[in-house]
Amino acid sequence: YVVQGGMPSYIPAQVAPPQAGTWDAAAAAGLCAPAGMAWQPPATGRPVPPPKLTEGFPDPESVEQQKRAYAYSLEQQLQQGIEMLEKQNEVQKDALRQAAVQQKEQYNLQVDQQLRSYEMSVDQQANYQLMGLSQAAHEQKACLEQQANQAILEYEQKKMQDEFARQQYEYQKKAYERHIEMARETQQKREEYAMKAQRMQAQFSMQDPAGAMPQGFPGAGMPPGACYGFGGMPGF
């Protein structure tokens, strides 16, 4: 196994070819004569049997068996490699999925934190505006209360002035009525006194041809027809 990009990677092992004892290609190559050189029997002496060129080489059936065994081993290694690659692929996908989930959770957490921060900012701004509205309403209520108190005070003052004026009017009215009554009574008494004086003067005139009024009588010595006031004072 090797590590590529932080993930384990599988590289199938190389399968060794068949070992010596069954099929030794190197030995077989050494026995092969160079091109153009055939085997020559010895020139003198007793003849020696020629060596077997197939000695040490596997027969075709053995070669076929070794080939099938090697192919089977390669197939097994291929299947193992495929399975390991599939497992590695799934592991990498799982890691990517987990990383994506973590990134999503982290992103959602950041978005939630940012949302809460924005909400707090909006709430704070709304609280400031609410405080401003409450203060303005309180000031307007205080101004309205002051204006109402001022209007009530002015009304009470006007009411007192009206009451004082009414009392003055009633007093002046009564004084005027008393004055008119006294003047009427005075005039009436004057007229009665003048008529009484005229009758008395007429009586005295009938008794005294000179028409002189007795001494001590109110209006004595005054010209006839003059008005006399109270206590013998002349009227106006």
Image (cartoon, rainbow, N blue to C red):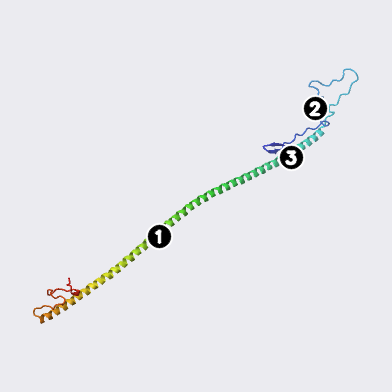
- Checking the image for residue 149, the label placed there is 1
Front-most of 141 and 101?
A: 141
Secondary structure at badge 3 equals helix
Secondary structure at badge 2 equals helix
Most extreme residue toward the top, as rendered? 44
Most extreme residue toward the right, as rendered? 46
Real-space CA distance between mark 3 and mark 1, rounded to the nearest whole angstrom: 101 Å
Considering only vertical position in the picture, is 6 above or below 140?
above
Q: Position of residue 166 (x, y in %)?
A: 31, 67
Q: In the image, what residue occupies the spot 66% across and 43% down?
A: 95
Q: Position of residue 82 (x, y in %)?
A: 71, 40
Q: As shown in the figure, which amino acid type bears the numbered disc 1?
A: Asn
Q: Closer to the observer: label 2 or label 1? A: 1
Q: Which quadrant would residue 9 be assigned to in this image? A: top right
Secondary structure at badge 1 equals helix
Mark 2 surroundings within 10 Å by alpha-carbon count, few (fewer than 14), some (14 through 19), many (20 or more):
few
Mark 3 surroundings within 10 Å by alpha-carbon count, few (fewer than 14), some (14 through 19), many (20 or more):
some
Residue of label 3: 80
Q: Position of residue 226 (x, y in %)?
A: 14, 73
Q: In the image, what residue occupies the spot 56% across and 49% down?
A: 116
Front-most of 91 and 187?
A: 187
Q: Is residue 87 left or right of residue 160?
A: right
